[in-house]
Image: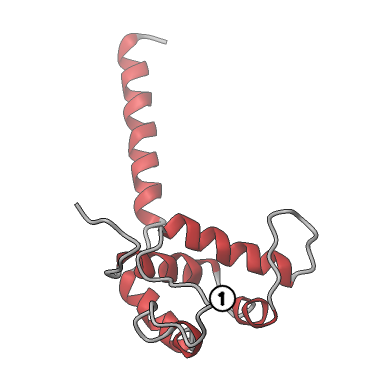
Amino acid sequence: MNSMSIKLAGAMALALFCGAGTAAAADLKAGQAAFEKFACASCHGADAKTSVMPTYPILAGQHADYLLHSLRAYQRGASGSTSVNARTNAVMTAMVQQLSDADMRNIAAWLASLPSDLAVRR
């Protein structure tokens, strides 16, 4: 393989990598719509930081990857998984069964974008 072929292969790999990231990018408006559709505000508050119970977590401003991991862990718990990465909670395991992976990514991204004392914006 010559130098030009290697450069071309590298450029193609980079283009594919960047394109895949764009395709998987979250949709903030869809995240807000899903938050509303699935009645997340009924427990976590309309602003996602004024929960109805002090033991319910503040979601606004949390890291998107943490929120996505948590939602997926509740789905694993709902499926009966005994993995250490499974969470069980009567309300949350029922709620997450309705969510697609795209819903979870979008909700997590939208929540992370909200202003909150949890986040430091630079």
The tally of labels here is: 1
Q: Is residue 94 above or below residue 67?
A: below
Residue 42, given in percent of the width and then of the height, sits at 48, 90
For the N terminus, give its image quadrant: top left
Residue at the image position 34 percent from the left and 53 percent from the top: 22
Quarter residue 82 falls in: bottom right
**Residue 60 x/y as whole percent:** 37, 70
Q: Amino acid at mark 1?
A: Leu
Residue extending furthest toward the top: 2
Measured along the vertical axis of the image, is residue 36 above or below residue 60?
A: below
At x 60%, y 81%, the residue is 95
Looking at the image, the residue that sits furthest to the left is: 122
**What residue is disc 1 on?**
99
In the rendered image, the residue lying farthest to the front is 54
Q: Nearer the viewer, residue 110 or 10?
A: 110
**Counting other residues with Cα less than 10 Å from the Cα at mark 1, is it few (<14), some (14-19), or many (20 or more)?**
some
Q: Nearer the viewer, residue 88 or 99?
A: 88
Closer-to-camera residue (122/103): 122
Q: Position of residue 88 (x, y in %)?
A: 71, 70
Is 27 placed left or right of 96 in the picture? left
Dot 1 lies on which element? loop
Residue 9 in the image: above or below residue 1:
below
**Residue 55 percent location from the top left of the image:** 55, 77
Relative depth, front residue between 5 and 65? 65
Coloring applied to the structure: secondary structure
Q: Is 79 above or below relative to 15?
A: below
Determine which quarter of the picture holds residue 118.
bottom left
